[in-house]
Amino acid sequence: MDPSTRNAAPLQPSAAFGTAAEDATSGAALAQLQALVIKRGLRPGLLPAPERAAVLALVWAALPAAGTLREPEVNELLRAQLAGAVACLDIDHVELRRWLVDAGWLQRDGYGRAYWRTPAEALPDAGAAWGRYLQDLDPGAWVQALADAHLAAREARRQAWTAAQPSGDAGA
């Protein structure tokens, strides 16, 4: 999918999430990621692996591509992501950091003091496809655009339903 059309992708959840690296950024997989980020209360451990990889990729995309960060800097960035782009996750920044490190999205030194984002080409399996696709994305703006579109569609449905209701004056 052309990166310039990412914001225009449908908000409809797909029936199946891509499992192969080549399918990670297919229209169906992207639609599923869009459906996930507008939800709340998701636990990474309860998500199927491909969905978890997609959400972790979104967090990864917001981390600086170059340079080394100290643990407090990583914590601050992850807290901001949990309040914004990945507010769908019901975890704290420490658990999110552990998920990122364990899944290979984030690297750290042996003492846990220095962290750096894994380069897109070094990400494992389906993560590499998500990494190539999302590496230049502003996750906060992308998720906000999705949320705005979702709320606008919901309001339009509400207004259509209200307009279709019989008025109370008809029987009087």
Image: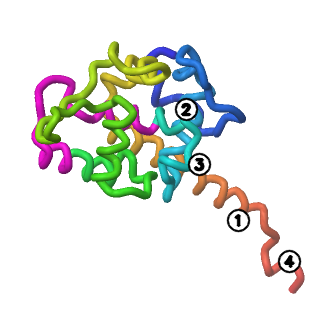
- Please give the count of numbered marks on the rendered protein: 4
State the residue at coordinates (82%, 70%): 166
Q: Earlier in the sequence, mark 2 or mark 3?
A: 2
Q: Secondary structure at mark 2?
A: helix
Q: Residue type at mark 4?
A: Ala
Q: Which residue corresponds to mark 1?
A: 162
Gap between marks 3 and 4 measured at Cα: 29 Å
Gap between marks 1 and 3 measured at Cα: 14 Å
Looking at the image, residue 115 lies above or below residue 170: above
Select label 2 or label 3 by which is in front.
2
Q: Earlier in the sequence, mark 3 or mark 4?
A: 3
State the residue at coordinates (46%, 48%): 147
Is residue 61 highlighted in magenta? yes
Q: Which residue corresponds to mark 2?
A: 50
Q: Residue type at mark 3?
A: Ala
Is residue 37 highlighted in magenta? no
Q: Which mark is residue 68?
A: none
Gap between marks 4 and 1 measured at Cα: 15 Å
- Pinpoint residue 7: horizontal percent, then vertical percent: 46, 30
Q: Which mark is residue 153?
A: 3
